[in-house]
Amino acid sequence: MKNFFALLVLLAFSTTLTFASGFKESREILLKKDEQKNIFVKYANKKKLFTLRWTLYTDGALVIFRSYDKIVAQNVLSLRHENQSFRLELMPKGGKYPQRAYLLVKFKEFKEESKEALFELFLFDKDKLVELEELKNG
């Protein structure tokens, strides 16, 4: 039984290390309610806009609205492990991009004093085709 437990712990740490080293870039974004973050996603000769904002925080859950390449979606992210992040595919399916890049957006913390939500973005891009350009608001 001890060996089985040790194996599970080893597997858990190895998948965490694989995840941690698998991304090309990470950044943190701090947003107030209804404040929108705009990021251009550039690859090949394409330039697509990714937007993110949140509208409601209650009971440890955050309602967010996002848009990428004119496709709008809504998610409810939680500080609990089960629903803490979402994955955003950045490239179309097909043979032109066999290793498609994606963003993992994680709800990291809600700051009660300032009423701000902290997100962590991870860019996974094995072929190093994607560049992110954060637009300054204002």
Image: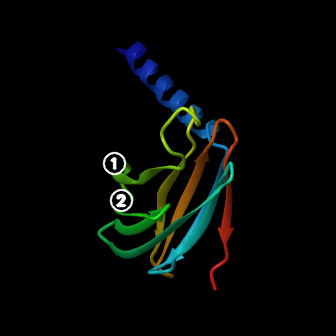
Numbered disc total: 2
Q: Where is residue 1 shown, x and y percent of the image?
A: 34, 14
Q: Which mark is residue 78?
A: 2
Question: Secondary structure under badge 1?
Answer: helix
* Residue 136 position by quadrant: bottom right
Q: Which mark is residue 2?
A: none
**Vertical placement of residue 117 versus 121, above or below:** below
* Marks 1/2: CA–CA distance: 8 Å
130 or 11: nearer the viewer: 130
Residue 46: x percent and y percent? Answer: 64, 55
Whether tag 1 and tag 2 are in contact, CB under 8 A, the answer is yes
Q: Determine which quarter of the picture holds residue 30.
A: bottom right
- Residue extending furthest toward the bottom: 138
Mark 2 lies on a secondary structure that is strand
**Amino acid type of the residue that numbered disc 1 sits on in the rendered structure:** Glu
Dot 2, how many residues are within 10 Å of its Cα: few (below 14), some (14-19), or many (20+)? many
The residue at which mark 1 appears reads as: 82
Q: Residue at x 66, y 67 (%)?
A: 134
Residue 60: % across, % down = 34, 66
Residue drawn at point x = 45 percent, y = 18 percent: 7
Percent across and percent down for residue 40 are: 63, 63
